[in-house]
C-alpha cells in the first residue's frame, strides 16, 4: 500500500508538471503569434496587465456576463510600445516579390528602350525627306544647266571662267545632296537631320540659281 501511495503521488506530480508545461507552451505560443501575424493576445491576461502592460497593450474593461460580470483584460496592439513584427518567411516572400517587381520594371524599361532604338534604326535606314525636296532640286538644276549653257553659247566661251566656277559650286551642292540621300549600313541618319540638311542644300542651290541668272543677264547685255 505504501508503494502504491508513492506511485499515486508521483503520477499526480507528473501530471501537474505536464499541465504546467502545456500551459506554459500555450502562453508562449500566444506571445509568438501576437508578435508575428496571429491575433494580438497574451496569457495569463492579468499577469501581462500588471507586469507587462507597456508592450502587451493590456487594458481593463467591464463586461456583463451574468455571474461572471466584472473587470476583464484585453490587449490592443495600438497601445503597445513594441508592435507586431513580420515572421521571417513573410519578410523573405516580400523581399522576393520586391526583387521580381524590380526585375519586371527593368525588363519593361529595356523593352521600351529596345523598341525606341528599333524605331530610330528604321528611321535612319529610310530617307523619308528626299521626296519633299526632289522637285525643287530638279527644277533648279534645269534652270542652272540651261543658264550656263546659254552663257557659254552667247559669249562664245569668253565667260568660261565664271561658267566653270558656278558649275564647280553646283557640283559640290549636288554631291552633298547625294550623300545626304544615301541609305543603308554606314549611312544611317535620322530623318529630322536629313530634312535640316536638305533645307541648307536648297538655300545654297537657290543662291546658285540667282548667280546664274545674273550671269545670263550680263551675257545678254555685253555680248550681242
Image: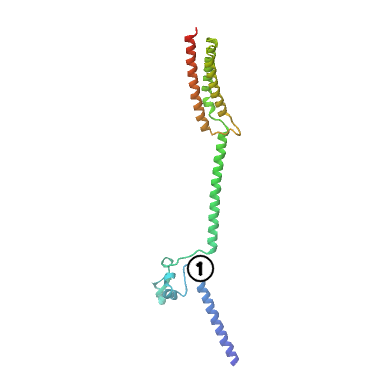
Residue 197 position within the rendered picture, expressed as x and y whole percent measured from the top left? 51, 29
What residue lies at 54% left-to-right and 47% top-to-bottom?
108
Of residues 101 and 116, the one drawn nearer to the viewer in this rendering: 116
Residue 5 position within the rendered picture, expressed as x and y whole percent measured from the top left? 57, 90
- Crowding at dot 1, Cα within 10 Å, few <14 / some 14-19 / many 20+, comes out as some
- Label 1, secondary structure: give it: helix
- Position of residue 204 relative to residue 105, above or below, is above
Res 71 → quadrant? bottom left
Residue 25 position within the rendered picture, expressed as x and y whole percent measured from the top left? 53, 74
Quadrant of the image containing the N terminus: bottom right
- Circle 1 residue: 33
What residue lies at 57% left-to-right and 85% top-to-bottom?
11
What residue lies at 49% left-to-right and 15% top-to-bottom?
215
Res 67 → quadrant? bottom left
Of residues 21 and 98, the one drawn nearer to the viewer in this rendering: 98
Residue 140 position within the rendered picture, expressed as x and y whole percent measured from the top left? 51, 20
Amino acid at each position: 500500500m505504501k508503494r502504491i501511495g508513492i506511485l499515486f503521488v508521483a503520477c499526480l506530480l507528473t501530471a501537474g508538471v505536464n499541465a504546467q508545461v502545456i500551459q506554459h507552451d500555450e502562453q508562449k505560443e500566444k506571445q509568438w503569434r501576437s508578435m508575428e501575424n496571429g491575433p494580438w493576445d497574451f496569457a495569463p491576461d492579468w499577469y501581462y496587465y500588471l507586469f507587462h502592460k507597456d508592450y502587451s497593450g493590456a487594458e481593463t474593461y467591464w463586461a456583463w456576463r451574468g455571474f461572471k460580470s466584472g473587470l476583464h483584460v484585453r490587449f490592443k496592439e495600438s497601445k503597445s510600445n513594441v508592435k507586431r513584427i513580420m515572421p521571417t518567411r513573410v519578410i523573405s516572400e516580400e523581399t522576393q516579390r520586391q526583387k521580381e517587381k524590380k526585375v519586371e520594371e527593368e525588363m519593361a524599361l529595356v523593352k521600351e528602350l529596345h523598341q525606341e532604338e528599333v524605331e530610330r534604326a528604321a528611321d535612319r535606314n529610310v530617307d523619308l525627306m528626299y521626296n519633299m525636296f526632289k522637285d525643287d532640286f530638279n527644277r533648279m538644276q534645269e534652270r542652272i544647266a540651261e543658264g550656263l549653257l546659254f552663257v557659254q553659247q552667247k559669249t562664245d566661251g569668253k565667260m568660261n571662267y565664271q561658267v566653270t566656277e558656278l558649275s564647280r559650286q553646283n557640283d559640290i551642292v549636288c554631291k552633298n545632296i547625294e550623300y545626304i540621300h544615301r541609305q543603308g549600313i554606314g549611312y544611317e541618319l535620322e530623318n529630322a537631320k536629313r530634312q535640316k540638311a536638305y533645307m541648307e542644300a536648297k538655300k545654297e542651290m537657290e543662291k546658285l540659281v540667282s548667280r546664274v541668272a545674273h550671269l545670263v543677264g550680263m551675257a545678254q547685255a555685253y555680248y550681242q
